[in-house]
Amino acid sequence: MKKSLYFLPLMAMVFTGCLSEDEEPDYVEWKKQNEEYVTKMEELTENGEKVYTKVVPEWAPNDFVLIKWHNDRSLTEKNLKPLSNSTVNIKYEMEDINGKYLGDSYSMTQYGDSIYQSMPNENIIGMWVAMTSLHVGDSVTLVIPAGSAYGSASRSPIEPFSTLIYHMKMKGVPKYEK
């Protein structure tokens, strides 16, 4: 009887160890797929020109985002461009690399119809970089690699190592700070 009492905790540890090993390969493969997606988007060309612009902030040289503008940037270049501590209004939809819906601003109404209001420096690094790279009126598709998003952390419904894809429009800068 004593032997079986010692044996049970040992078996529990073995099975627990097996479970965590089985879960890990899913994220290893997911991480690889996300990294490959970012590389593919970074190299994507159309008519001989890169589709996405890689934006690397001076203050975070190991982070970057890929931005594809949908509007004529010459028409918005004189519009206000927020600073890190400005308050911005954006509309957005967010998905993962498989097109799985992760969130949007459509149900937000406190600051206007579908408006997400925030200071860029209160967001994940990728959003911070994007928000301070856009002028009011810019409409973009934004690719944020996992390292500039949530990294290895999970934030429901976002899985660890997820590249985030935003479709967003800079609607305004109600408070510009210096």
Image (cartoon, rainbow, N blue to C red):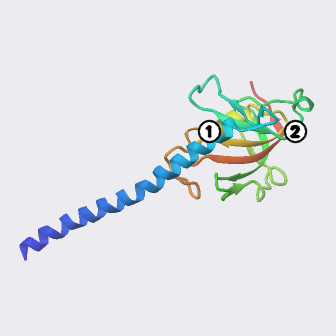
Q: Which residue is mark 1?
A: 39
* Residue 45 coordinates in the image, percent (x, y): 75, 36
- State the SS at label 1: helix
Q: Amino acid at mark 2?
A: Asn
Image quarter of residue 62: top right
* Residue 40 coordinates in the image, percent (x, y): 65, 41
Give above or below for 47 relative to 169: above
Give above or below for 80 relative to 18: above
Instruction: Give me the residue at 82% from left, 35% from top.
Output: 47
Q: Amino acid at mark 1?
A: Thr
Can the viewer see residue 128? Answer: no
- State the SS at label 2: loop
Task: Kindly check if marks 1 and 2 are in contact, taking CB atoms under 8 A apart as contact.
Answer: no
Q: Which residue is mark 2?
A: 71
* Residue 32 coordinates in the image, percent (x, y): 52, 46
Question: In this view of the protein, which residue sits in the foreground, 44 or 113?
Answer: 44
Instruction: Give me the residue at 79% from left, 43% from top.
Output: 89
Question: In this view of the protein, which residue sits in the foreground, 132 or 49?
Answer: 49
* Residue that protrudes farthest toward the right in the picture: 75
Instruction: Give me the residue at 92% from left, 32% from top.
Output: 75
Instruction: Give me the residue at 24% from left, 62% from top.
Output: 13
* Residue 78 coordinates in the image, percent (x, y): 89, 26
The quarter in which the N terminus is drawn is bottom left
State how far apart marks 1 and 2 are (Cα). 24 Å
Residue 11 as seen in the image, left or right of residue 53? left
